[in-house]
Amino acid sequence: MKKSNWIIFGILAATSIFFLTMWYVLGFHLIDSPVDLVITIVWWLVIIGCITLIHQVEKKRQEKLEQGLN
């Protein structure tokens, strides 16, 4: 993966850690709500989707680059 892809992954992971920290600092973990689980699942699906999209785009870019060299 390119350096920029790792940077994006790092930003997404840091954002997740920040949101989780704020969740506990603001005391939202004390409230029992099923919406919390849904929000968490959606957020991680977004992160996984971004990583998958970046990987696919990078793979296509590398294939085009290889075809151009041959």
Image: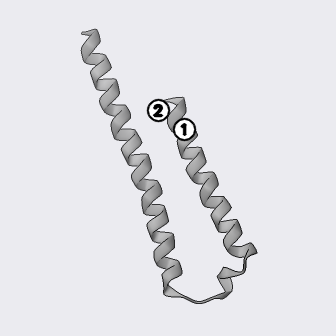
Q: In the image as oriented, which residue stretches furthest toward the right?
A: 25
Q: Nearer the viewer, residue 17 or 26?
A: 26
Q: Residue at x 50, y 37 (%)?
A: 5
Asked which secondary structure carries label 2, the reply is loop
Q: Position of residue 36 (x, y in %)?
A: 53, 79
Q: Residue at x 59, y 47 (%)?
A: 11
Q: Nearer the viewer, residue 41 or 28?
A: 28
Using the image, tell me which numbered label, if any, was put on residue 6.
1
Asked which secondary structure carries label 1, the reply is helix
Q: Residues within 10 Å of mark 1 (few under 14, many from 20)?
A: few
Mark 2 and mark 1 in contact? Answer it, CB < 8 Å. yes
Q: Residue at x 33, y 27 (%)?
A: 61
Q: Is residue 33 above or below residue 3?
A: below
Count of marks overlaid on the render: 2
- Position of 55 with respect to 2 (left or right) is left
Q: Residue at x 39, y 40 (%)?
A: 55
Which quarter of the picture shows residue 57?
top left
Q: Amino acid at mark 1?
A: Trp
The residue singled out by tag 2 in the image is: 1
Separation of disc 2 and disc 1 at Cα? 7 Å
Q: Amino acid at mark 2?
A: Met
- Position of 27 with respect to 38 (left or right) is right
Q: In the image as oriented, which residue stretches furthest toward the bottom?
A: 32
Q: Is residue 34 above or below residue 38?
A: below
Q: Position of residue 21 (x, y in %)?
A: 70, 67
